[in-house]
Image (cartoon, helix red, strand yellow):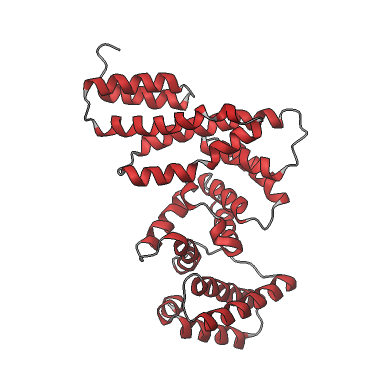
Amino acid sequence: MNGETIQGLIQKAYDSLKASNAVSAYEALNEALKMDYEHPEVKHALKCLNWWLERIKRLPEFSDVYSRGGFLLSQWKAFYDFLDRIGEAYDPCQYALRRFVFSTALQSFQDLLGDGVNQYDPGLLLLVGRCYKGVGNYEAALKYLEQAGRFKREDAETLSELADVNALLEETRAAKALFREAFFLNAQGIDLRSMESEMIIRLRDRVKEQGYKGPELAEWIPIYGCLYGVFSVRRELKQVELGRLKQDIFNLETELRSKGGEGLLKPRLLNRYFWLIDHYENADENPGMVEETMLKIKIIDPVIYDRYRN
C-alpha cells in the first residue's frame, strides 16, 4: 500500500465493503489509521465496521440461513442507535456498509429461494426485496416487493418498502399512493430510517423541523405529506373501507375526549379526517359532509385547518 493516500485507502475500504470483502476493508482502514491516528472519517469507519464484524461473528450461533439473514437485518435499528451515540455520520461509509450487510444477508435468502419452494412466503419475499434495495438493485427489489405485496396488501412495512423502491425508480405516482396508504394503515409499522428515496427523506426532515420526533414523527408525516402535496394521489374508498374509516374516527374521537391529551391520537384522527374528505370529494356526494369534517379539523387544530384550506 506504499504511496497510497488516506483518502485513497478510505475509498479502497468502501469499495471492498461493496464487494463483500470485509477483510480487505479492515486492512485498508487500519493502514490509513497508521498514517493519521486522529483522522475522523477513518476512526468513524473503523468503529462502524467493527460493530458489524461483531455481529457477523455471531452468525454461526444460528442453525439455519433464514435466521442468519434475519438477524443481520434486525440489527439495523441497533446500528442507527449506535450511530446516534458516536456522533457525526459519513454517508459514503453508511452506503458501503449497507451494501456489505444487505449483500451478506441476501446470500442466505437466495439459498432459500433457489428451489422455488418458498416463492409464496410473503415474509421471505419482503426480506429479499429489502436486501435488493439495500444493494442498489431496485428492479429486482420491485419484483420481490410486488410479490410480497400481493400477499400482504394491508401491511404498512411492505407497502412502505414498495413505495420507497417506486420512488427510487422515479415511479412517482405509484410511490405517492403507496406511501399514503402505508402511513394510513400503520405509521408505527414503518421504519423511517430504512427509507432511501429523496421523496420521503425530505418530507421526514421537514416534519422534524416542526419539532416532532420519536413515534409522533411518523404520525405527523401523512398530515404534512398532504399539506405539502407529497401524498397527493388519492382514491375513493370501497363501502367496507368507508365503514371501517368512520368507526376508526368515532373510536379516536372518543379516546381523544376521554384522555384529554393529544399524543399520537390527534395526528391519527386528522389523517382519517383527510381520508374521509378525499372520499367525499372523489365520490362527488355529500358536500355538506365535507364541511362538517372540516369543522371538526378546525376544532382540534386551527393551524392545520388553515393550512389545509389554503
Quadrant where the C terminus is found in the figure: bottom left
Q: Is residue 241 above or below residue 64?
A: below
Q: Could you tell whether 66 is left or right of 7 in the image?
A: right
Q: Residue furthest right?
A: 117
Viewer-proximal residue, 150 or 53?
Answer: 53
Q: Quadrant of residue 49?
A: top left
Q: Is residue 188 above or below residue 196?
A: below
In the image, residue 24 lies at what x, y percent? 41, 18
In the image, residue 143 lies at what x, y percent? 65, 40
Please tell me which residue is depicted at 30% across the width and 43% down the height of the picture: 88
Quadrant where the N terminus is found in the figure: top left
Please tell me which residue is depicted at 56% across the width and 29% down the height of the picture: 59
Q: How many marks?
A: 0
Q: Residue furthest top?
A: 2
Q: Quadrant of residue 227?
A: bottom left
In the image, residue 74 lies at what x, y percent? 54, 42
Viewer-proximal residue, 73 or 249?
Answer: 73
Q: Residue furthest front?
A: 61
Q: Is residue 97 above or below residue 164?
A: above
Q: Could you tell whether 278 is left or right of 116 in the image?
A: left
In the image, residue 38 lies at what x, y percent? 21, 30
Please tell me which residue is depicted at 53% across the width and 30% down the height of the picture: 58
Please tell me which residue is depicted at 59% across the width and 29% down the height of the picture: 61
Q: Is residue 296 above or below residue 145?
A: below
Q: Quadrant of residue 12?
A: top left
